[in-house]
Structures are given as C-alpha cells and as structure tokens.
Image (spheres, rainbow, N blue to C red):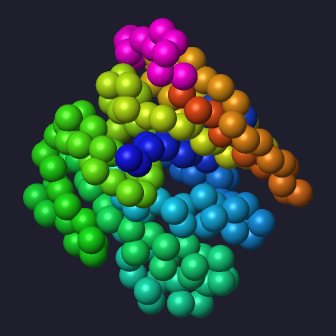
C-alpha cells in the first residue's frame, strides 16, 4: 500500500506563492534540488490540480532543461517517469506523458490508488491537498521552509484545518532552507478545513 505525501516549498510565513502569484523566491539551490530529487525518486504517482499541473508540465519537455544544471535534468527524468493524475473541471485534456485527467477530486479513487500502489504517491498544490487533508488521505506532510517572508499570498495549508502530526525527519541546508517531515497521526482528531 502506498502512502500519500503532501510536499511543498514555503516561505517562513507559510505561503507557496506571494500575493502576485510569484514563487521565484522559492527556487531551490543545487543542494536543496538534489535533496528534492531524492525525495521524489520513490514516488510512483503525482496528484495535481490544474494550476500545479500547469506549473509542472515544464518538466515534460526535455528541451526545456537541456542547458540546465544536472540536478534539474535529473528531476525532469524522475518526473517524466512517474504517473500523473490531474483533477480539473477546466481542462479538456492533458498533454504530458503518463498522465490521466479526472473532472473532480474523488477521495474514493485516491483511496483505491493508495491501496493498489506499490510505490508512494504525492499530492502537489495547496488547493487539491486541502481536499485530500479534509478526506483524511494524507499520510505525510513534508515542507521545505525557505528564508523568505512574503507577507501574503497562497497559503500552504487550508484555513481552519487541524491535523495531529508526529515529527519524522528534519534537515537544514547551507543556504538557510530547512526541511521538516511529519507523519499524520490518523488516530488523532483531524478536522476538515472551514472558513
């Protein structure tokens, strides 16, 4: 059975994008990128909403990373090798390899995917992750905090959600980023997000 991991790179004040929708301040340096590659390598399936999928399809184009550092070329190969599932009412089709499209997030489909998977799954993007957190599907939350405060924007977590977590791993990087990983304590009282 595969575990579902929500991974995000966030500012110290908890945002994955600033008020202008930018996240260039979160670009990993080479050390962090190597670490992310190691995190992503065992993932068999990535789950995305439309916006995160549109950010990530960059990695499906070998020409886009041809002149980039080795860590980026390696990540592109890791990403292309994994299956992708996109949940979107706005997309009519998907253009990347090994990708399927579903019109809405379906917790039962994700449960079945976890149950039948020999590899772990990851969910990317705070909106779709909020739905998975509310449905009790997320098993691990992994964050890379970067040394920036952006003052607002897209929060890494849904408002009002309460989830009990147990620290699983932590690591600091020379550039000031800090990785923390938590196991979700499914025996605790988790509450769905609300406004």
Inspect the magenta stretch and tell me whether residue 41 lies in it. no
Position of 70 with respect to 90 (left or right) is: right
* Magenta stretch bounds: 185-195
> Split into 4 quadrants, where in the image is the C terminus?
top left
Up/down of 166 relative to 144, above or below: above
Quadrant in the rendering for residue 71? bottom right
Residue 158: x, y in percent? 45, 24
| Residue drawn at point x = 43 percent, y = 43 percent | 4
Left-right relation of 42 to 70:
left
* Residue at point 15%, 50% (across, down): 102
Residue 6 point in image, percent of width and height: 49, 42
Q: Main secondary structure of the magenta part?
A: loop
Q: Position of residue 116 (x, y in %)?
A: 28, 50
Horizontal relation, residue 90 to residue 164: left or right: left
The residue sitting at 30% across, 44% down in the picture is: 115
- Residue 16 showing in the rendered view: no
Name which residue lies at 13% across and 46% down. 103
In reply to whether residue 193 is colored magenta, the answer given is yes
Does residue 119 lie above or below 172 as drawn? below
């Amino acid at each position: 059975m595969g575990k579902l991991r929500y991974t995000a790179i966030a500012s110290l004040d908890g945002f994955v994008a600033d008020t202008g929708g930018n996240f260039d301040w979160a670009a990993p340096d080479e050390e962090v990128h190597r670490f992310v590659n190691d995190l992503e390598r065992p993932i068999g399936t990535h789950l995305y909403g439309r916006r995160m999928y549109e950010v990530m399809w960059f990695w499906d184009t070998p020409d886009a990373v041809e002149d980039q550092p080795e860590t980026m070329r390696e990540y592109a190969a890791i990403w292309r090798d994994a299956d992708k599932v996109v949940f979107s009412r706005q997309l009519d089709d998907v253009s990347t390899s090994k990708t399927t499209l579903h019109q809405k997030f379906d917790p039962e489909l994700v449960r079945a995917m976890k149950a039948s998977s020999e590899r772990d799954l990851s969910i990317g993007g705070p909106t779709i992750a909020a739905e998975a957190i509310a449905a009790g599907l997320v098993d691990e939350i992994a964050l890379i905090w970067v040394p920036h405060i952006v003052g607002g924007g897209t929060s890494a977590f849904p408002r009002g959600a309460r989830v009990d977590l147990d620290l699983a791993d932590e690591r600091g990087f020379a550039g000031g980023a800090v990785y923390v990983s938590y196991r979700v304590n499914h025996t605790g009282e988790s509450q769905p997000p609300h406004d």
